[in-house]
Image (tube, rainbow, N blue to C red):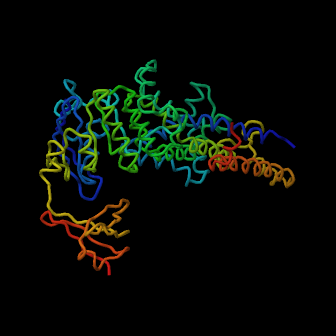
Amino acid sequence: MIKAHIEKTLKASENPLKIDVKIHVSRGMFASLYGASGAGKTSTLRMISGLLKPDHGLITNHEDLWFDSNKNITKNPKHRNIGYVFQDSALFPNMTVFENLEYALTNKRDTKHLYQLIKLMKLDELCNQKPGTLSGGQKQRVALARALAQKPALLLLDEPLAALDNESRVELQDCLLQVHKTFRLTTLLVSHDIAEILKLSDQVFVMDHGKITQQGSPKTIFTQNSLNENFEITGEISKIERQGIQFCMTVRIQNTSVKIMAKKFEIENLKVGDEILVGTKNFNPFVLKTSD
Amino acid sequence: MNWDPIILTFQLASVTTFLLFFIALPLGYWLSQTKNKFKPLIETLVSMPLVLPPTVLGFYFLIAFSPGNAFGSWLNEWLGIKLVFSFSGLVIASILYSLPFMVHPIQSGLTNLPTSLHDASTLMGKSKTTTLFKVLLPNCKASLLTGIILSFAHTIGEFGVVLMIGGNIPGETKVASIAIYDEVEALNYNTANVYSLILCVSTFLILLFVYLQNGGSLKKYRR
């Protein structure tokens, strides 16, 4: 179990942020740190990894003491055996994909593990390529494989999927779940994507202004506690079709299209190209025209 | 025409650049990583040769290395080293004079690398030395090359420091820049012109190589 009771005041910005968190993640769990930008998620992850020193507190990994401000003990990050995936992938540009993975091996002779990872993460065809030639999704797949090359007990993921397109993100989410189970890892993910957390995590810590405001199962936190009977989205009508006594409108909302059923009186003033607001109030759907 | 000043100039530039690289590398690395409160002081000292007249630096070297003074006399009597008006003295003065030209590119090359590269290597259990040589330096080759070439070219162009500490001893301290001055004084404009032209062409070619290399224009010729 990872236990972190840590405090740190970040003075870099104009308004100092005081991080004061208590995080317990049991062995084999997939936990997430959720919160808005600037809530202190990445700094918390960096403190657990040892890349940032807390002002006060205690960090233990099972029986292993990593940090204790009272006893003035700080275990060097290089001895914590942590797999860490950075948002920018942090692949070494001078090395090929294979060399990146090989560099991370704790035991250089353990090529069996290396080839297992290459096969599992489907990296065979990328092995001789330099990181500069890879797509964002491929880079993060290599970064994840590299983090696993040293056989870590704890995997820390700092928004590794944030900059990816939807297709790559879904693919890597599946990959993350697979390796988490295959290697029986304890994983801590930093994310501000609720859908991603719901899909991946057993446990979530909600952070706001450096504090943990909520914790528990993602389903409890993100569905039951915040179920709202009202929602509103805006989009543009791309098609109107008659279907029996009703009409079906195809509405483009950002990059996706949704079909919305409407009654005749609801579409009387609407035409293709109009901007509309689709919403619900007290669980009843409604459509409003917003453009002239 | 006597080729000794030209040969001596390139010897001095080569030895200075070689030694300076190994001095500037740890210094540049330390400056790129440290949050020590003395960092601004060290950075100021390293940058001093950029703004000081070379004669000031040469003057203090002359005073320090002079056998008439404590340090120079100690060097001479205990170690048998005479730095004033000698090639060794020129090398030491040149190293200090060209220090910012090597330290600054190395420091800025390392500082501009994403910190995640260093962090990733550390979390993989690698030592600082391994991280420096396997990850950081190979990813700032352009800065290293800039430092090496600028230091070399800058040493070729030295005059004030060399004149103060080295004097004008043929084959020992009379480098090309001094020789040009000498020839002009003696009204041998043709010889001065040949020396000057050699320095112009060689420094032009050196700098052109750096810009081609750093701009990626030479990559297509590599196998």
Q: Position of residue A119 (x, y in %)?
A: 44, 28
Left of B171 or right of it: where is A168? left
Q: Which percent across, then down, holds residue A138?
A: 45, 41
Vertical placement of residue B51 versus B165, above or below: below
Instruction: Give the quadrant of the N terminus of chain A.
Output: top left
Percent x, y of residue B200: 76, 52
Side of A239 where A118 appears, left or right: right
Q: In the rendered image, which quarter is residue B176 located in?
A: top right
Residue under the point 41% across and 43% down: B115
Query: Measuring 63% from the left and 32% from the top, which residue is drawn there?
Result: B82
Point 23% across, 45% down: residue: A198
Single out the residue that lies furthest toward the bottom: A292
Front in this rendered view, residue A79 or B44: A79
Specify the quadrant of the image occupied by residue A137.
top left
Q: Is residue B183 left or right of residue B79?
A: right
Nearer-the-camera pick, A256 or A209: A256
Q: Residue B141, located in which quarter of the rendered image?
A: top right
- Residue at 48% from the left image edge and 45% from the top image edge: A135
